[in-house]
Image (spheres, helix red, strand yellow):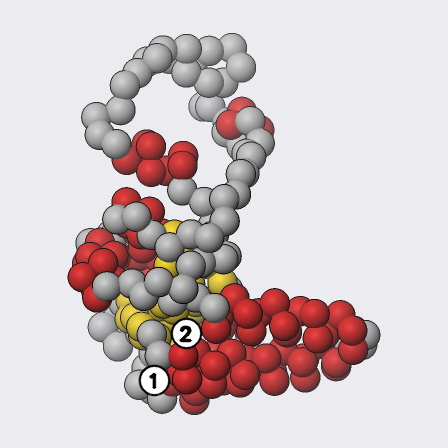
């Protein structure tokens, strides 16, 4: 298979499985029905997550699954308080702060399931120099991100929808305290999940804008 003049393949092909359907049809859904999600579905999604590739096969991902409304509200309130404080320090107007905090609160508390995607460095290699230590950390981050992508794809495959929220990166200590997580768990994302109550469309730039051929 050789690239065409515009940098894209000129050969049509048929994928071996339905994974391409999942990749192209999955959407980031922010509104869900109130239906509870059976544990079997959640476990199936998490099982898919732990089969992601990882650096040295150390599997640095950790997952905190939140189902109770009280815990979701506690987490959302704690994160909202930090968000309000940070935005106020940035000089953002109170109206915009409340709108932003309100959106975040609703997205967390209205989701039937919230999965906190965390990273642990306990099994990763340890180096004495900063450069290699930083690279080792980035390798762990990449591994956790791949597990998160598996969650998004597996959720769609079992009839659920999900959305990635990066907010924990701005307040990992708040998330740790609210959920009483182990000391070595570093929160990196919230994945909301449930049965979709909305439909969304998305677009992508042409592939040729992101690819160079050598």
Q: Which mark is residue 201?
A: none
Look at the numbered disc 1 and give the secondary structure of its residue: loop
Q: Is residue 69 above or below residue 201?
A: below
Q: Residue at x 18, y 61 (%)?
A: 40
- Mark 1 or mark 2: which comes first in sequence? 1
Q: Residue at x 55, y 27 (%)?
A: 206
67 or 80: which is nearer to us? 67
205 displayed left or right of 128: right
Q: Is residue 173 visible?
A: no
Percent position of residue 168, x then y:
49, 72
Which residue is under mark 2?
187
96 or 174: which is nearer to us? 96
Q: Is residue 31 above or below residue 176?
A: above
116 or 69: which is nearer to us? 69
Which residue is under mark 1?
181
Q: Quadrant of residue 103?
A: bottom right
Percent position of residue 135, x then y:
39, 62
Q: Quadrant of the N terminus?
A: top left
How packed mark 1 is, by other alpha carbons closer than 10 Å (few <14, some 14-19, many 20 or more), is: some
Q: Residue at x 60, y 83 (%)?
A: 82
151 displayed left or right of 28: left
Q: Quadrant of the C terminus?
A: top left
Look at the numbered disc 2 and give the secondary structure of its residue: strand
Q: Is residue 161 visible?
A: yes
How packed mark 2 is, by other alpha carbons closer than 10 Å (few <14, some 14-19, many 20 or more), is: many
52 or 203: which is nearer to us? 203
Do labels 1 and 2 touch, CB within 8 Å? yes
């Amino acid at each position: 298979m050789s690239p065409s003049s515009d940098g894209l393949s000129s050969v049509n092909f048929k994928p071996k499985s339905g994974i391409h359907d999942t990749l192209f049809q999955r959407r980031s859904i922010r509104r869900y029905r109130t239906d509870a999600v059976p544990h079997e579905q959640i476990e199936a999604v998490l099982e898919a997550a732990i089969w992601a590739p990882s650096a040295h096969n150390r599997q640095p991902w950790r997952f905190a699954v939140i189902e109770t409304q009280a815990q979701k509200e506690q987490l959302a309130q704690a994160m909202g308080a930090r968000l309000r404080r940070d935005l106020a320090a940035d000089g953002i107007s109170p109206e915009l702060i409340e709108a932003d905090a309100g959106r975040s609160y609703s997205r967390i508390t209205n989701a039937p399931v919230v999965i906190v995607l965390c990273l642990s460095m306990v099994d990763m290699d340890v180096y004495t120099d900063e450069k290699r230590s930083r690279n080792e950390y980035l390798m762990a981050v990449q591994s956790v991100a791949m597990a998160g992508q598996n969650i998004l794809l597996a959720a769609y495959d079992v009839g659920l929808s999900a959305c990635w929220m990066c907010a924990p990166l701005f307040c990992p200590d708040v998330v740790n305290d609210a959920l009483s997580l182990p000391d070595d768990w570093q929160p990196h994302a919230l994945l909301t999940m449930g049965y979709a109550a909305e439909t969304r469309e998305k677009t992508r730039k042409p592939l040729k804008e992101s690819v160079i051929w050598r």
